[in-house]
Amino acid sequence: MTDDLAADEFTRRIATDWRTAGLAPADAALCALAVKLTKQPDAMTQRDISTLRNAGFSDEAILDAVQVVGYFNYINRVADALGVEPEPGVRAWEEHG
């Protein structure tokens, strides 16, 4: 398998279910934080931040991650509320093959 095909397959596994994609522990911790911040922001606790610290993330990296996740949540909600359609040529994950 070429490097590009391997990368595509790994990306597809992450998009399908990051929990079973074979991520490094630090990457899995980051994904867990992103999911929780997206789906249950009111349930976030200091323990969530400590988990990332224990996985090796600096406070600056944690702040960056929270800001990126928060921004994408914000912009997706704005786009959903205004009925923004994807640009031509942008395909859903399910259409990638």
Image (cartoon, rainbow, N blue to C red):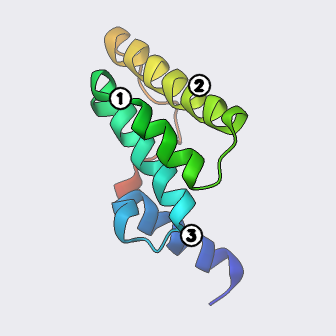
Q: CA distance from mark 2 to mark 3?
A: 26 Å
Q: Residue at x 46, y 17 (%)?
A: 74
The residue that label 3 is drawn on is 8
> Residue pushed farthest top?
82
Q: Which quadrant of the structure image shows residue 8? A: bottom right
The residue that label 1 is drawn on is 44
Q: CA distance from mark 3 to mark 1?
A: 32 Å
Instruction: Residue 97: tell me if it is visible.
Output: no
Mark 3 residue element: helix
Mark 2 residue element: helix
The residue that label 2 is drawn on is 67
Q: Which mark is residue 72?
A: none
Depicted 89 relative to depicted 45: above or below: below
Instruction: Residue 91: tell me if it is visible.
Output: yes
Q: Earlier in the sequence, mark 2 or mark 1?
A: 1
Depicted 84 relative to depicted 48: above or below: above
What amino acid type is highlighted by mark number 3?
Answer: Asp
**Percent from the top left, x then y, of residue 81?**
32, 11
Mark 1 residue element: loop
What amino acid type is highlighted by mark number 1?
Answer: Met
Q: Residue at x 59, y 30 (%)?
A: 68
Q: CA distance from mark 2 to mark 1?
A: 14 Å
- 81 or 15: nearer the eye? 15
- 95 or 34: nearer the eye? 34
Crowding around mark 2 (Cα neighbors within 10 Å: few <14, some 14 to 19, many 20+) is: few
Q: Residue at x 68, y 86 (%)?
A: 2
Q: Nearer the viewer, mark 3 or mark 1?
A: 1
- 40 or 46: nearer the eye? 46
Q: Earlier in the sequence, mark 3 or mark 1?
A: 3
Q: Which quadrant of the structure image shows residue 97? A: bottom left
**Percent from the top left, x then y, of residue 91?**
45, 47
Do tag 2 and tag 1 residues touch (Cβ < 8 Å)?
no
